[in-house]
Image (cartoon, helix red, strand yellow):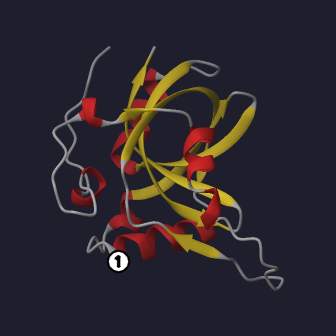
Amino acid sequence: MKWRTIILIGLLCTTLTGNARAGWNDYTPTTLSGITAKHAKYLSNRKVPKGAVAINLHAGGDPFRSTVLFLGKVRNIKRDRRSLIEMWGKSSGVDTAAGNFKKEIKVRENGKTYWIPIQEILVTHFKREVKKKGEVMLFMVYIGTTGKTPVFLVNEFRAF
């Protein structure tokens, strides 16, 4: 599989302590459901007024990787997730984060479906290299939730 060299948003490869990550091998293998369970205490249980969105921001950004099934769908990022990405970027000193994520991909892992924002620079390569219903390893960070929905960001991928 061909790997691309990509200039990433600096914080996506940095922990809260500011120590730079060495590379893709530092992305811990896990599952989306595992990350969701780990951060379940941040999920909103409160009622939210109609038209409002509850957002929980996670500044840690520890990188992880997970193998998922691509369901062949790519769409524009929904407004609430876009707002979370923008707040996450601003709180992390990366004001351009929202502009780097405009699309999201639909994937399935262990029977659960997720829409996951992907860096704009990766979208063309992703559509070309990953087949519908094809397995793909995603290199991601968890940035928080919108309502009870976890939000992850794709930094890189590896198609199988």
Neighbour class for label 1 at 10 Å: few (<14), some, many (≥20)? some
Q: Is residue 117 left or right of residue 155?
A: right
Quarter location, residue 78: bottom right
Label 1 sits on a secondary structure element that is helix
Which residue is nearer to you in this view: 140 or 45? 45
Q: Is residue 58 left or right of residue 50?
A: left
Residue 28 image offset from top left, x and y in percent: 37, 34
- Which residue corresponds to the image point at 49% horizontal and 23% vertical from the top-left? 136
Question: Amino acid under label 1?
Answer: Lys
Residue 24 image offset from top left, x and y in percent: 26, 33
Quarter location, residue 158: top left
Direction bottom: furthest residue:
49
The number of discs equals: 1
Q: Is residue 74 left or right of residue 16?
A: right
Residue 112 image offset from top left, x and y in percent: 73, 36
Quarter location, residue 96: bottom left
Residue 65 image offset from top left, x and y in percent: 42, 34
Which residue is labeled 1 in the image?
90
